[in-house]
């Protein structure tokens, strides 16, 4: 099964943690991925590492929700910063 990643929009980042996280999500956007679960683990781990590297900022954590059948959304908690990052199932 293949999936397509897409960063739809975000608010203006307010600190170094948010700027680094946005740059990471922009880099991961518009890609085809093979394994959804591995990619979700990768995003969670990278979010944790970015939070640890920016200790002066309020840490954030990543979680996922299924918005529609075959579409997943990324939710960042611990911040008032809004990001819309989606993972779409590709029809084969």
Image: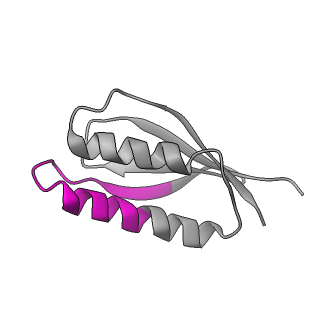
Residue numbers of the magenta segment: 44-64
- Residue 68 picture location, percent across and down: 67, 47
Q: Nearer the viewer, residue 46 or 78?
A: 46
| Residue sitting at the far top | 12
Instruction: Inspect the magenta stretch and tell me whether residue 50 lies in it.
Output: yes
- Residue 49 picture location, percent across and down: 29, 64
Q: Would you place residue 80 above or below residue 73 in this image?
A: above
- Residue 20 picture location, percent across and down: 32, 46
Horizontal side of 58 relative to 40 (left or right) equals left
Q: Nearer the viewer, residue 85 or 16?
A: 16
Horizontal side of 84 relative to 71 (left or right) equals left
Q: Split into 4 quadrants, where in the image is the C terminus? A: bottom right
Q: Would you place residue 92 above or below residue 23 in this image?
A: below
| Residue sitting at the far right | 92
Instruction: Inspect the magenta stretch and tell me whether residue 69 lies in it.
Output: no
Residue name at image x 16 percent, y 49 percent: 58
User: Which quarter of the picture shows residue 62?
Assistant: bottom left
- Residue 69 picture location, percent across and down: 71, 52
Q: Split into 4 quadrants, where in the image is the N terminus? A: bottom right
Exactly how many numbered labels are in the figure? Answer: 0
Residue name at image x 30 percent, y 64 percent: 48
Horizontal side of 27 relative to 48 (left or right) equals right
């Amino acid at each position: 099964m293949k999936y397509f990643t897409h960063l739809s929009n975000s608010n203006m980042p307010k600190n170094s943690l948010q700027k680094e996280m946005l740059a990471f999500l922009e880099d991961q956007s518009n890609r085809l991925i093979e394994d959804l679960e591995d990619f979700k683990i990768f995003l969670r781990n990278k979010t944790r590492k970015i939070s640890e590297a920016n200790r002066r900022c309020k840490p954030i954590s990543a979680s996922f929700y299924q918005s529609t059948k075959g579409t997943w959304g990324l939710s960042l908690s611990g911040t008032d910063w809004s990001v819309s990052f989606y993972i779409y199932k590709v029809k084969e």
